[in-house]
């Protein structure tokens, strides 16, 4: 699976961005999908995950109520809608695919990774 993330940019605190991740290669709907982020000097961390059908989602506590992960299997694309952005959300965001149950999504469990897209939130 090849993954290409896009949609990052510079936004003021309180603003919104929508990240997209287009997949190609193997059957997209087979995989759970996740979004991860890595801030400067920090380890990559889990942000959100979605199961193969899109019916089950998981979020890290710091983004619950602000971020929404979704997928369109017909378009082989997963999205991350980010609202009420905060400066601490600044990071490079990565999408990843894993032949796992979405509840087990972690940086070490995913099989395929895309190149990241930078999100910068100014105060």
Image (spheres, rainbow, N blue to C red):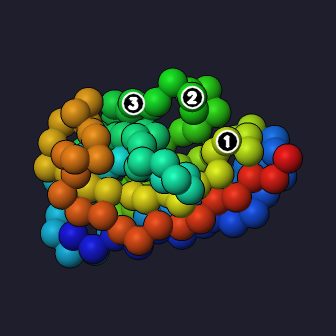
Q: Position of residue 89 (x, y in %)?
A: 64, 45
Please tell me which residue is depicted at 15% across the width and 42% down the height of the picture. Answer: 100
**85 over 97 or under it: above or below:** above
Judging depth in this view, the residue of 33 and 74 nearest the camera is: 33
Q: Residues within 10 Å of mark 1 (few under 14, many from 20)?
A: few
Label 2 to label 1: alpha-carbon separation: 10 Å
Mark whose residue sits in front, 2 or 1: 1
Task: Describe residue 1's horizontal placement relative to residue 119 as left or right.
Answer: left
Residue that protrudes farthest toward the front in the picture = 41
- For label 1, the SS is helix
Residue 20 shows in the view: yes
User: Which residue position holds label 1?
Assistant: 88
Label 2 to label 3: alpha-carbon separation: 12 Å
Specify the quadrant of the image occupied by residue 28: bottom left
Please tell me which residue is depicted at 74% across the width and 45% down the height of the picture. Answer: 87
Decide which of tag 2 and tag 1 comes sooner along the chain. 2
**103 over 115 or under it: above or below:** above
Mark whose residue sits in front, 2 or 3: 2
User: Which residue position holds label 2?
Assistant: 62
Mark whose residue sits in front, 1 or 3: 1
Mark 2–mark 1 contact, CB under 8 Å? yes
Please tell me which residue is depicted at 36% across the width and 48% down the height of the picture. Answer: 34
Q: Residues within 10 Å of mark 2 (few under 14, many from 20)?
A: few
User: Which residue position holds label 3?
Assistant: 58
């Amino acid at each position: 699976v090849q993954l290409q993330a896009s949609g990052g940019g510079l936004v003021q605190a309180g603003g919104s961005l929508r990240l997209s991740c287009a997949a190609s290669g193997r059957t997209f709907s087979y995989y759970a999908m996740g979004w991860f982020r890595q801030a400067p000097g920090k380890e990559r961390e889990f942000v959100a995950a979605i199961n193969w059908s899109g019916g089950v989602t998981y979020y890290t506590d710091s983004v619950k109520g602000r971020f929404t992960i979704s997928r369109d299997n017909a378009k082989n694309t997963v999205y991350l809608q980010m609202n009420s952005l905060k400066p601490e959300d600044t990071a490079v965001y990565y999408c990843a695919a894993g032949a796992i149950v979405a509840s087990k999504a972690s940086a070490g469990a995913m099989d395929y990774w895309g190149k990241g897209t930078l999100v910068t939130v100014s105060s």
